[in-house]
């Protein structure tokens, strides 16, 4: 479970573990099995796309969750499984819940804090993303987000903005790009480096979609697609027609540039359009460039990437927004099928992105820019 790093990150055998009496550790959850392997995404899948018979949408983790099932009778089971995954991850990994294991660890920087193994796995996913991107998808930007005003659920942040309680303090310098290597991991404990705040917002929602698919497979469901805040994973032997939209939950011109594609595997859309607020007289968004600690300022307003897993797609789409002008070259070199929309609405695609699909029904799962 320990992440390889150039710094010692394992807990010494004699190290005491911090577990404040006021914040007891919850019983360990059963770790979901890794998501089942899928054929690398084939957006031009020759099979006839699934026509969903079951559909459900709700709000969780501060975003819109969409679920579609191939069989109507699978919807109840699939929604229960997905909702449980979302609750479990939110319980341990929310930066906004003072009773979460992540908040307890952030409150004790430099010390080992006993946590649920589910959080250890979530942190491992975030560290893997940092390693794969050279730190451009960085899990230690929590302090920067707080100082920029994103220190609570976005609805509360915007309400504070409306009431005028939105003063701006001095922005901290971002942590070094390789500082993620100083995060300590053990089977049931983590250590947050001093002077940093761990935030899993860049990977947690995508990971939930992958975990949900693993649960669907274990339950014997036939086919489904789960979208958590625009990070989408399909399950089953057939492709799904997916609406790629810049703004979740909207249709027509209000949704921005939209497109329908047939998907197998995963799609993730990262956007600077949705999670926005004003502070200190300046409009801000939640996708930060770890090199500056400030919101990205590149040419793209949304990036959608296809990959075998939702985490892989999400990491690539987030990295692309940070890279800016260099994103198309990086995505192409990595063989990622992607669709990028610039601030003027112009669309650029990389090799492998499909021609638009034309389904005969309208109730479609969505990969939208809710993150």
Image (cartoon, grey):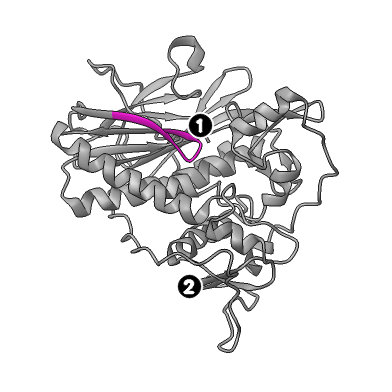
Residue 188, numbered circle? 2
Q: Is residue 218 magenta?
A: no
Report x, y in % for residue 364: 30, 24
Give the CA separation, mark 1 to mark 2: 31 Å
> Which-is-in-front pick, marks 1 and 2?
2
232 vs 159: above or below: below
Q: Is mark 2 on a helix, strand or loop?
A: loop
Q: Which region of the structure is painted magenta? A: 56-64
Judge by depth and name the residue closer to the eye, 79 or 184.
Answer: 79
Judge by depth and name the residue closer to the eye, 136 or 229.
Answer: 229
Q: Is mark 1 on a helix, strand or loop?
A: loop
Report x, y in % for residue 47: 18, 33
Disc on the earlier residue, 1 or 2:
2
226 vs 7: above or below: above
Q: Is residue 59 magenta?
A: yes
Circle 2 packing at 10 Å, graded few (<14), some (14-19), many (20+), is some
Q: Is residue 88 left or right of residue 225?
A: right
Q: Is residue 115 left or right of residue 280?
A: left
- The image quadrant that residue 250 belongs to is top left
The residue that appears at 72% across and 38% down in the rendered structure is: 149
Q: Name, please, the residue furthest toward the bottom.
A: 14
The residue that appears at 59% across and 85% down in the rendered structure is: 12
Q: Name, please, the residue furthest toward the top.
A: 253
Report x, y in % for residue 87: 40, 48
Dominant secondary structure (helix, strand or loop) of the stretch shown in magenta = strand
For residue 105, say whether it is visible.
yes
Q: In this view, does 142 lie to the left or right of 10?
A: right
The residue that appears at 19% across and 51% down in the rendered structure is: 219
Report x, y in % for residue 362: 28, 16
Q: Name the residue under label 1.
A: 370
194 vs 158: above or below: below
């Amino acid at each position: 479970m320990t992440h390889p790093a150039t710094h010692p990150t394992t807990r010494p055998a004699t190290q005491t573990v911090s577990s404040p009496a006021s914040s007891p550790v919850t019983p360990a959850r059963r770790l979901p099995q890794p998501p089942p392997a899928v054929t690398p995404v084939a957006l031009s899948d020759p099979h006839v796309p699934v026509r969903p018979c079951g559909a459900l949408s709700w709000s969780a983790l501060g975003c819109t969750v969409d679920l579609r099932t191939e069989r109507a009778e699978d919807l109840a089971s699939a929604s229960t499984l997905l909702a449980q995954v979302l609750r479990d991850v939110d319980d341990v990994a929310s930066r906004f819940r003072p009773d979460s294991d992540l908040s307890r660890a952030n409150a004790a920087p430099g010390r080992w804090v006993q946590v649920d193994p589910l959080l250890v796995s979530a942190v491992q996913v975030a560290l893997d993303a940092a390693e794969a991107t050279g730190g451009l998808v960085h899990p230690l930007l929590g302090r920067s987000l707080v100082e920029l005003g994103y220190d609570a659920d976005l609805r509360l942040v915007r309400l504070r903005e409306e009431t005028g309680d939105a003063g701006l303090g001095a922005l901290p310098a971002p942590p070094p790009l390789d500082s993620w290597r100083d995060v300590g991991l053990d089977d049931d404990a983590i250590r947050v480096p001093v002077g940093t705040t761990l935030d899993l917002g860049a990977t947690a929602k995508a990971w939930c979609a992958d975990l949900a698919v693993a649960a669907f497979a274990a339950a014997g469901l036939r086919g489904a697609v789960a979208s958590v805040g625009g990070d989408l994973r399909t399950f089953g032997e057939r492709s799904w027609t997916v609406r790629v939209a810049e703004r979740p939950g909207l249709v027509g011109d209000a949704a921005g540039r939209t497109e329908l594609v047939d998907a197998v595997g995963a799609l993730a859309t990262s956007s600077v359009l949705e999670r926005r607020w004003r502070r200190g007289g300046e409009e801000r968004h939640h996708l930060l460039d770890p090199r500056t600690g400030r919101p990205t300022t590149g040419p793209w307003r949304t990036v959608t990437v296809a990959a075998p897993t939702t985490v892989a797609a999400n990491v690539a789409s987030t990295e692309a927004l940070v890279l800016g002008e260099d994103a198309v070259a990086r995505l192409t070199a990595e063989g990622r099928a992607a669709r990028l929309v610039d601030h003027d609405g112009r669309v650029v695609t990389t090799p492998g992105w499909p021609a638009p699909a034309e389904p005969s029904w309208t109730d479609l799962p969505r990969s939208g820019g809710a993150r």
